[in-house]
Every structure is written in structure tokens, then in C-alpha cells.
Amino acid sequence: MFDRLSAPIATLVATHLGLLPAQVNALFAPPAKGVAGDLALPCFQMAKARGVPPPTLATELAGILTAAGITAVATGPFCNVTFDPAAVATTLLPLLSPAGTVNGSRSGGALALRSTLGAGQRVCIDFSSPNIAKHLAFHHIRSTMIGNALAHCYAAAGWDVTRINFLGDWGTAFGRLIAGWKREHLTLEQLTAAADQVTFLNDLYVRISAAAKADPVVEEEARHWSKALEDGEPEARNLWQIFKTASLKEFERVYGLLGVTFDSWKGEAFYEDKMEPLLAELASKQLTSQDQGATVVDLPTLLNTDKVKTWKKPVLIKRADGGTLYATRDLTACDDRFSEFGFSRSLYVVDLGQSLHFQEWFAVARLLQRPYADKLRHIGFGVVLIWNDEESAWAKGRTRGGKIMLLREVLDEAIERAAAIVADKNPDLAADERAAIARAVGIGAVVFNDLKNGRTGDVKFKFEEALRFDGETGPYLQFAHARLCSIERKAEHRTGGSPVHLTNEAEKAVLLAIARLQGALERAVELDEPSVLAQALLTLASAIASWLTSGNSDLNARVLCADSAIAASRLSLVIAARGALGEGLRLLGLIAPERM
RNA sequence: GUCCCCGUAGCUCAGCUGGAAGAGCAACGCCCUUCUAAGGCGUGGGUCGCUGGUUCGAGUCCAGCCGGGGACGCCA
């Protein structure tokens, strides 16, 4: 969308210098902070090609950039272009307020966050993927919300998106759980009566693990039930299903709070009996070998050359005891997903600690000459570090006392703090609306805190920081949105539209920030990096806040000013900005309340 | 040992394909008879871990170091 403004300038310069517009376009840069201008054109390269000093060319270009609606000034080796606010509005506003949406509650602003980059392509996104019979710990927010944001962004960019929750619902832990369940003569009634069923199962697991450690008889029972489960013995299978159902119920509660949904819940158990054909294929293609009783794909001998020694170790495909492994399961699941969805891209939103695992099985997929082998992407992210007061240091995963921090607890705490603030700031709201706002704002704070920075860095989590509602936070974005909504409500009787009377810099800044959203969305998708969008939204919200606040002291600067023609134009911008910001928040997985 | 992530203001971090050092928080000073102050405006604060290299130009690219974290065969 921004190119609507920059393209004409690129064409003028290109024509003057005998270049292609694309060549000029590639040189554009945002001007430095203290410099006046909306678009900078560094003249170094073009000046070199022409054999003149950069400042000379800058001056020359400033001289030819005389089109309506722009002002060009040479500042040293830079040619800085300033857009006329009204020209920006005339160019952009019609794109953001298509006929019929200007005065209604609907807004075309969401169009600022649409792209056709992915048209006709499908992407599978594997994210969240918690283990059954365990809680969603706070660190699960990373995979869950990065994956959720990417799913929204891909969809906005034209992709067909399939959201996959690859549940960890298989393993020896369930044999133990069943053994414990039987040993303690527990009943379904007891489980469902528990305040928290996952805690109930978790506690059971802790007890039976301790017992198994102390008593070989118990350990033997656990082994027995693991085997029974693998063999599909009805009682074992039935109990496993009970555990799974109880866990899913708890997961759905948290996903419901976060507004996260999935299209596929096929977990590890689904693939447990489907791996033999893959193992057979690997063997028939002579890609496997035996090593200490285990079956491996020997990547070093298959792929390393004298010059390039990328691979240090073989990948284990099958254990010495016959059990299959992580890599085998991922490959099998990937075959299944490709045949079901025929994806053009498949994302795995999993922490960076597992990089090697993904590199390895991606390599095996290439050896198998899978058509999807080059469409796989591991979307890695850093760990959550929690501040430890006693040691005055950042530490992984746990709070004081080694207790794991649950996602639900953090969200509840955030909602509680937000509720106190809402009650204080806006006591007149109805109780149910206050509660809804508190949920949106509290969760928004936690989620945005997780998405605003680059995903590969570790997240340093402090309650006081993550639950802050001022500064560069989710609530800051939500507040700007609520202010825009408030103005729209008060403007019910105004009429909108054209001609355009937007003439000040604050209004232009809002328009330019909106215009840059599309590029941010496309970059967010190409880099699989939600923070690119998050940062662009902060810029937009800042421009909005600055614009609206200027009306506090200057009645003429208000949207709803005395001049009805100007008010109507400004209202169009309010509606467009509200739509753009609201859509941006939605893409990140935040709710944008209309008041707060 | 090999590979990966990180190192920019006191703290937490942005910085797009190399092009004129940024924000939030904290500190200090202003702006509420408010289109919602969860806001705005301003001030102070930086040899961008170090050393070389490429380049007209390096926080950004390359090489090598230093420091913090992580991964590296029968868990996932």
C-alpha cells in the first residue's frame, strides 16, 4: 500500500536517470529520526554510476521531484521527500474506506492487512502440541501464540491454513498412570469430581513414580500396563482415553481463554501403528543400518563429503527394543499431512533446543526424495526465563521452590490485575462488560509481551513487566483502539467522506503507519516472525495516540471539531485506523475491546 | 569438541535487502473544566562485546576471538 506513494517518485527518478523504477525503489529508506521527510533516497550508488558527488545528485533529484503533493529537499547525499498530507489522504483513504463503509460501524481499515502473496497455497502449522496428563505450563504460551499469530497472518496473506495440534498422547508415562489408577482403585467419578482433573492425574503420576522407584513390583505393573496399552487391550485403552479426555477438557479451557483453535488434533498415538511402512521403505532404499541394536539413518556416510562435513551423528529411527522414536513419528505424520492437505509449506513451531532434531528428519525426508522435503520449516523460538530473586539471575522454567508456573495461573493473575484497573478507570460499565474487558486486556498484556520481540531470543519474564498496562504493551494498542471507537460513537450523526480535508502532520503519520502495515504483514509471513507486525502496530498506535491527544488542548485539532467538512474527513481516518488496528490485534491473537 | 541462540542507553528490547544510532521502562520537567491521562510533549543517558576484513559507507555482510545460554544416540 505504501508503494502507492513511493512508486510515482521511483518512476520520476528512474526516468530522469535512465534506470528501472525497481532499481530506484530498492534504494528507498526511511529517513533518520531528526530529519524532515517521509521517504529518503540515498544517492551514493546512483551518483557513483553517474560520476558525480552524491550531494550534487541529491540536489539535482530534488530539482526534478516537483510533482503535485510532494516536496523534495537535498540534505547532503540524501534526497528527502515529504508528502503533502492531503495528497496522502487522497491516495490512501479510498483504499481503506470502500464505498458504503465510511459511515457505518464497519471499516475497510482491515484491508491494510491483506495480501495475495499466498494465494492458492496451503500451509500446515504445527503448534502448541502439549503432553496429555500434564498442565499447559506458562512456557507453552510461546508455541501456542506464535503459531496462532502465524496462522492468522498467513490467512490474511491469502494462504489456506491448517492448524495442527500434535498432542503428546503416547508413551510409557501412561502405563504408569494406569498402574497407579488400578493400584489406588480410583474411579471416573473421583476424577471428574476433582476441581482440576489434570492436577489429579499429575499428582497420581508423581505418587506412582515414587512408588515404582521404591518397589520393583510396582515398576513391573507399570511395564505390564504399558505393554497392554500398546497391544490395544481394552481396559488399558479405555483408561488412556479417559486421561486424554480429561486433559483435553482442561486444554480447551485455556485455549478458549486465549482464543486459539485447531483444525487437527491427531496426536502421536494416531501414528503409533502406522510407522512400519516407513521403516520398510527406508530399509528397501538402503538408507538404514544397524548400530548397537538400534536402526539408524547414517547421515554422515550418506551425506557428508570430503569437503562438507555437516553431519556428526546418525539419526535413530528405531530403538534396540523395537520402539520407534520422535523422528520416525514426525516423518510418518508428515507423510500423512502431505497426502491429506498437499501443503506448499509446513511449519513446526517448536523451541530452538530441538533444531538438530528437525534438521535431521528434514534431511531424511530429502533422502527419501519426498516432494515436500524443501517445504518444511522449523520455526524455532527461545526459552522463557523467569527472574529468580534469591540468585538474582534469570533461570529457566520454574518459579521459587521449583514449582512450575502454569499458563492458566499467569492468565488468571493478569485478568485479576486488569479487572482492578478497569474498575478504577471505568466504574460505570456493566459488570459483565467489565469482566470481558478485563479478560481481553489482561490476556492481551501477556500475549503481546510474548509476541513483540523477535522469536529467537529468550523471553525474560517478570510478572511486573509482562503484566504492565502502559508503554509498549498490548493494552496500549487496545487503548488506542478504544479511543477511536469512542470517537466513532460520539460522531453518530456526522456524515463522512469527501472531499478530503486532512492537512496536518499527525494525520499523515497515522495514514503512513497504516500504509506500512501490508509490508509488515508480508514480511511477518516470509520470516515467520509475528514481532514484525507487532512492531508496526506499535508505530501505528503511537501515531494514533499522538494525533488524538493533540485534540486535548486544541479544540480545532479534534476529530469532532466545529468545521463539519473537516470533521467528516477526520472521521474517515478514525474509522480506517480503527479497522486497521483492530485487524492487527486480531491477527496477533488479541481482542480489541470497543471501550476500556 | 561440533553446531545453534544471544551480546545496542541503568533495565527490557527495536533497528527491513549495508546508507544520517531508536523505543519503552526507570529518573526529571510540563499537559486533564479529557472526542477515554491505560495518553501526549520535552530533558538527560550509547567507543552498537572485541579485533581484523570487504565497501565510498558496517549495529547490519565475512573471518577469528571473548562472554552468557542451549543442543549433540536408544525421552519428546
Image (cartoon, coloured by chain):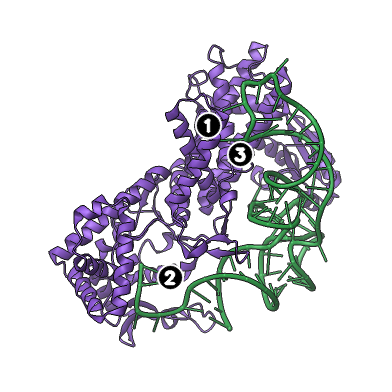
- Which residue appears farthest toward the bottom when viewing the image? A292
Classify A440 as above or below A303: above
User: Measured from the top left, where is residue A44 in percent x and y?
Assistant: 79, 51
Q: Which residue is mark 3?
A: A516
Mark 3 belongs to chain: A
- What amino acid type is highlighted by mark number 2? His
User: Measured from the top left, where is residue A179 in percent x and y?
Assistant: 22, 69
Q: CA distance from mark 1 to mark 3?
A: 36 Å
| Mark 1 or 3, closer to the camera | 1
* Badges 3 and 2, same chain: yes
Q: How many marks?
A: 3
In the rendered structure, the answer to whether residue A506 lies left or right of residue A284 reads right
Q: Check whether the beta carbons of the residues at disc 1 and disc 3 lie within 8 A of each other.
A: no
Q: Is label 1 in a helix, a strand or a loop?
A: helix
Q: Which chain is green?
A: B
Q: Which residue is mark 2?
A: A357
